[in-house]
Image (tube, rainbow, N blue to C red):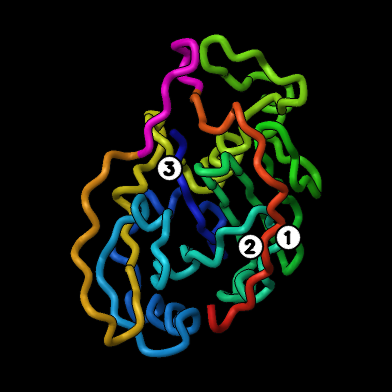
Amino acid sequence: MGATAATIWFTDVAEPKGILAIVGRPDEEASRVIAERVLGGPVAGRPESLARAADPQPGHVYVASYGGLTVVTHDGLRVSRPSELDDAWWDLVPAKRAFLLIADAERAIGGFAHRQDGTVRRSFSGHPLDILENDGLPELFEGPFWAGEHPLTYAEGVEPDPRALPFHPMEFAEQANRELLGFRFTHPLAPTDLDPARIQVIDFVPAGTPPEPPRPDMAPPQAADWQGQGQQQFPGQEQRPEDDRGKVRSFFGF
């Protein structure tokens, strides 16, 4: 099944994927300052990989600051539509550009948004049978998806739904992530993809929180080949979710 992710990136660099290809340990002090803003007080941190941090645990915030490139993952980023995200998240780190990725495997919702100079330029979210949000001008990578080159696949004996989109929104959203950052979370990765398991972040919790056992090693989210051509089978194609508009989250106190 596809990966679950709730991440927001802030960037002032021209080629984020080039930076990610060479980064090592994040700037711990700069990352800590951001984490303390989110959690509202002193924090304690330990190393984690972005692959596991992308599906954030409640009560944790995962941060990696690399100068002009910063990633934050937190349970508060789990919205159904980018427009539901409180502006405090967009303004968390001063940056020229920000990118939000939403991938909810349980509800088969995928979405993304690009914001530049304080304005959201493109946002999308959807389920295989519904477009939940579709604002701004499409980006170049979107063409093959809207043209039907990444069609949904169905379990044997399941008839295609005439309302279905010409692609799975989770695959669509992860391709937006790949275009900007050089990788996606769902395996198998392309030969040219960076491996998010090799991108280091810091897992922060409020200071004084009792230590937790390490998260168990888990296999990366796998997706079956589509007709043997490397296209991916994503979850949720046979069900229609409730219209969950959710609740706009305030920045402090969640």
Q: Secondary structure at mark 2?
A: strand
Q: Is residue 63 above or below residue 78?
A: below
Within 10 angstroms of label 1, few (less than 14), some, or many (20 or more) residues? some
Q: CA distance from mark 1 to mark 2?
A: 16 Å
- Could you say where residue 219 lies in the image, as x and y percent from the top left? 27, 39
Q: Amino acid at mark 1?
A: Ser
Q: CA distance from mark 1 to mark 3?
A: 23 Å
Left or right of 110 in this view: 61: left
Magenta segment: 221-231
Q: Is residue 85 above or below residue 179?
A: below
- Could you say where residue 175 lies in the image, as x and y percent from the top left? 56, 37
Q: Check whether the beta carbons of the residues at disc 2 and disc 3 lie within 8 A of each other.
A: no
Q: Which residue is mark 2?
A: 97
Q: Residue at x 69, y 73 (%)?
A: 87
Tell me which corner region of the image, top left, top right, bottom left or bottom right, holds residue 63.
bottom left
Q: CA distance from mark 2 to mark 3?
A: 21 Å
Question: Residue 107 magenta-drawn?
Answer: no
**Which numbered disc, 1 or 2, marks the residue that appears first in the sequence?**
1
Q: Secondary structure at mark 1?
A: helix
Q: Which residue is mark 1?
A: 83
Q: Secondary structure at mark 3?
A: loop
Extreme-bottom residue of the structure: 41
